[in-house]
Amino acid sequence: MSSPTPAEDEVPAIQTGPKGVINDWRKFKCEDQDTPPSKKALLRQISNPQSDDNHDRLNRKMSVQEYEMIAEEDEKGLRKYRKQCMKEMHERFSFGPTFDSVVELDNGEAFLEIIEKEHRLTLVVVHIYKDGVKGCEALNSCLDCLATEYPSIKFCRIRAAATGAGERFSDDVLPTMLVYKAGELLGNFLSMTQHLSEEFFAADIEAFLNEYGLLPEKEFVACPDEEEAGVEVE
């Protein structure tokens, strides 16, 4: 099999097969800001050797130096690489954008724009809240976690007073969660605390939305708090 041409190496796509995965890993480490300069220099030397023979030899298998570098990687770094690969695959082979955090909406205009102008295949979940109202802070934390697990969903939050219709969102109907898709209201959940136990977590909100068939298949399990508490990989 002939070695890949420079043009092929520049294609911004996730490659398949052992050789492609190795090359993608090299590129990721060269671009990662957390990679020390000395390692970046080594990877560039390995990925772009001057000799064509060396290029063929090193491109067929991962070098000893790279195996040592992988051994030094902590689990968090490997998760970061895997998550990036999955996100790129999602964007390349599916429809609609991806997100990785909750969007804070400043006013009613931003609220309406999210509903009306978001991609037609994107599910939008909006939390209307007020500081100090029971359940609002907990729901914000839950959505922060779910945003990392469901990157195809656009999670947003907005203060009730900022919606421009504060009189409709009094304290007794908060926290409120609205779900939209293609401008259509799919879910209107007032007083979310009435649907949940006194103490609730991200898994409870996930189960609640799943009861109404509103969530797609989970793509990432990447809640930061859960990652830090994860079991050590030997």
Image (spheres, rainbow, N blue to C red):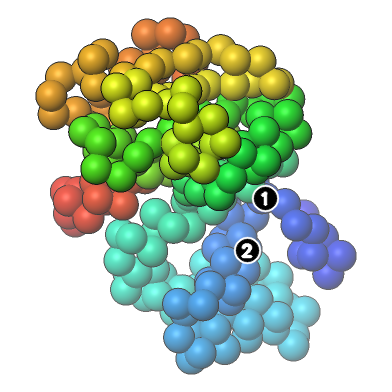
Crowding near pointer 2: few (<14 within 10 Å), some, many (20+)? many
Q: Which residue is mark 1?
A: 15
Q: Quadrant of the C terminus?
A: bottom left
User: Of helix, strand and loop, which one carries label 1?
Assistant: loop
Tell me the kind of residue under disc 2.
Asn
Of residue 10 and residue 76, the one placed in the foreground of this image is: 76
Using the image, determine if residue 62 lies above or below residue 51. Answer: above
Classify residue 176 by image quadrant: top left
Task: Residue 23 in the image: state x and y as whole percent.
Answer: 62, 63
The residue shown at (83%, 69%) is 6
The residue shown at (25%, 36%) is 133
Is 123 left or right of 65, judged from the image as shown? right
Q: Which residue is mark 2?
A: 23
Tell me the kind of residue under disc 1.
Gln
Q: Are marks 1 and 2 in contact (CB under 8 Å)?
A: yes
Classify residue 11 by image quadrant: bottom right
User: Of helix, strand and loop, which one carries label 2?
Assistant: helix
Is 219 left or right of 173, judged from the image as shown? right
Is 231 left or right of 180, judged from the image as shown? left
Measured in 3D between alpha carbons, the distance from the residue under mark 1 to the one under mark 2, in whole angstroms, is: 8 Å
Residue 227, numbered circle: none
Is 75 left or right of 30, judged from the image as shown? left
Of residue 3 and residue 36, the one placed in the foreground of this image is: 36
Task: Residue 33 in the image: state x and y as whole percent.
Answer: 51, 77
Using the image, determine if residue 35 lies above or below residue 62. Answer: below
